[in-house]
């Protein structure tokens, strides 16, 4: 197991380099001058602008700029500084906790609702409940996150407070503690809940058709034991894969949700940094998200052996 983990971490290095190089090239290709964007509407002094370009290696070739960045990340853990001389790691540290709280809230909602509804639909396959759940998930997939966010913000955040006088779902900021993440967490998890519900239903239906399920039933085991101990445990393997990969999707896809609900997370910071062409911040944010993807996939692979004893890593 230890050798497998080390091998996977070594394999992650070219993935990290490829992803960061790609985003580095995209940011480099954006129109406009990042130094001019730093001064806003004011025209920068040519001498000052030239000093800044030299300081941040903007006059160097693209690959040389990338080498300065990736060597700092790999060998010193240094993500660089932005144009205000603030370390990127400090910027991300202040924003990361908000996005992590939002992503974990969405992931918990997704796991509970997705697996629960999928299990319910699978056990009532072909009945009205199954049809209603499948139709609801299709509707949820069809509605853009932007629309879902504004509608729920209006209905549950504004109208519900006017009707009941209770501020249950704050509509902006993180001033209400964990309650601040309930509404944006559901908006962020909405589409994933729909996909996970369908995946759970399909996986469990296929599992319940297996020979070992019929054997367990023939031996006289209770339906709850057959489904819980034998059926659901084996059906969880593709669900764990989806949830592990979706953690990175939730953190990377929080840009729209954080903007709607004015959450000071890395999604909001990423949007601002792209607009200002703060290359170190954009690439640093993407690097963190890539690392989360890699670690989440590694944890998922290790969980396979827990769920299915037949899986071993040499």
Image (cartoon, grey):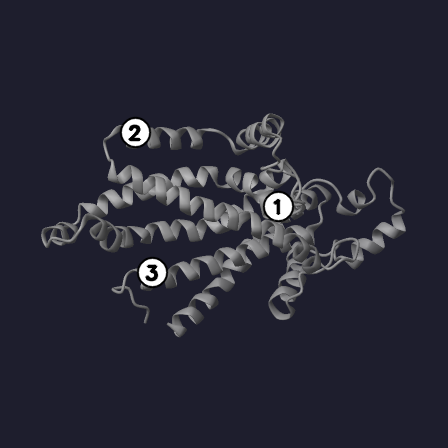
> Residue sitting at 48 percent across and 62 percent down?
12
How far across and down, in percent of the image, does residue 37 sit? 78, 43
Q: Secondary structure at mark 1?
A: helix
CA distance for labels 3 and 2: 31 Å
Residue sitting at the far left: 218
CB atoms of marks 2 and 1 within 8 Å: no
The crowding category of the residue bearing disc 3, from other C-alpha atoms within 10 Å (few below 14, some 14 to 19, many at least 20), is: many
Q: Is residue 142 above or below residue 51?
A: above
Q: Quadrant of residue 85?
A: bottom right
Quadrant in which the C terminus appears: bottom left
**If you read the primary sequence from the N terminus, does the residue marked by circle 3 or circle 2 appear first?**
2
> Residue sitting at 33 percent across and 28 percent down?
132
Q: Which mark is residue 267?
A: 1
How far across and down, in percent of the image, does residue 33 sit? 76, 44
> Residue sitting at 69 percent across and 46 percent down?
273
Write down the residue under mark 2: 131
CB atoms of marks 3 and 2 within 8 Å: no
Q: Which mark is residue 304?
A: 3
CA distance for labels 2 and 1: 36 Å
**If you read the primary sequence from the N terminus, does the residue marked by circle 2 or circle 1 appear first?**
2
**If you read the primary sequence from the N terminus, does the residue marked by circle 3 or circle 1 appear first?**
1
Q: Quadrant of residue 164?
A: top right
Q: Secondary structure at mark 2?
A: helix
Quadrant in which the N terminus appears: bottom left
Q: Is residue 38 left or right of residue 247?
A: right
Q: Secondary structure at mark 3?
A: helix
Q: Is residue 160 left or right of residue 246?
A: right
How far across and down, in percent of the image, does residue 56 sit? 76, 57
- Between label 2 and label 1, give the one nearer the viewer: 2
């Amino acid at each position: 197991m230890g050798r497998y983990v080390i091998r996977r971490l070594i394999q992650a290095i070219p993935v990290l380099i490829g992803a960061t190089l790609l985003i580095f090239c995209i940011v480099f290709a954006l129109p406009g001058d990042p130094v001019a964007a730093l001064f806003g509407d004011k025209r920068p002094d040519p001498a000052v602008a030239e000093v800044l370009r030299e300081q941040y290696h903007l006059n160097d070739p693209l690959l040389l700029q990338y080498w300065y960045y990736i060597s700092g990340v790999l060998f010193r853990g240094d993500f660089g500084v932005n144009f205000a001389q603030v370390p990127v790691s400090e910027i991300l540290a202040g924003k990361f906790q908000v996005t992590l709280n939002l992503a974990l809230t969405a992931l918990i909602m997704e796991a509970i609702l997705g697996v629960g509804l999928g299990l319910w639909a699978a056990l009532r396959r072909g009945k009205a409940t199954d049809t209603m759940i499948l139709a609801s998930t299709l509707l949820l997939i069809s509605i853009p996150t932007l629309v879902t966010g504004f509608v729920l913000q209006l209905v549950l955040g504004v109208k519900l407070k006017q009707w009941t006088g209770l501020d249950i779902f704050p509509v902006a900021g993180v001033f209400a503690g964990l309650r601040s993440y309930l509404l944006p967490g559901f908006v962020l998890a909405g589409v994933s809940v729909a996909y996970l519900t369908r995946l759970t239903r399909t996986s469990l239906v296929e599992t319940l058709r297996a020979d070992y399920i019929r054997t367990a039933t023939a031996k006289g085991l209770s339906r709850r034991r057959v489904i819980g101990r034998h059926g659901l445990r084996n059906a969880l393997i593709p669900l764990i894969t989806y949830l592990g990969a979706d953690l990175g999707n939730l953190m990377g896809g929080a840009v729209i949700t954080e903007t709607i609900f004015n959450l000071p997370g890395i999604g909001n910071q990423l949007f601002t940094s792209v607009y200002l062409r703060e290359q170190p911040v954009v690439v640093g944010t993407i690097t963190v998200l890539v690392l989360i993807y890699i670690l989440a996939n590694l944890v998922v692979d290790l969980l396979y052996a827990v769920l299915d004893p037949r899986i071993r890593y040499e």
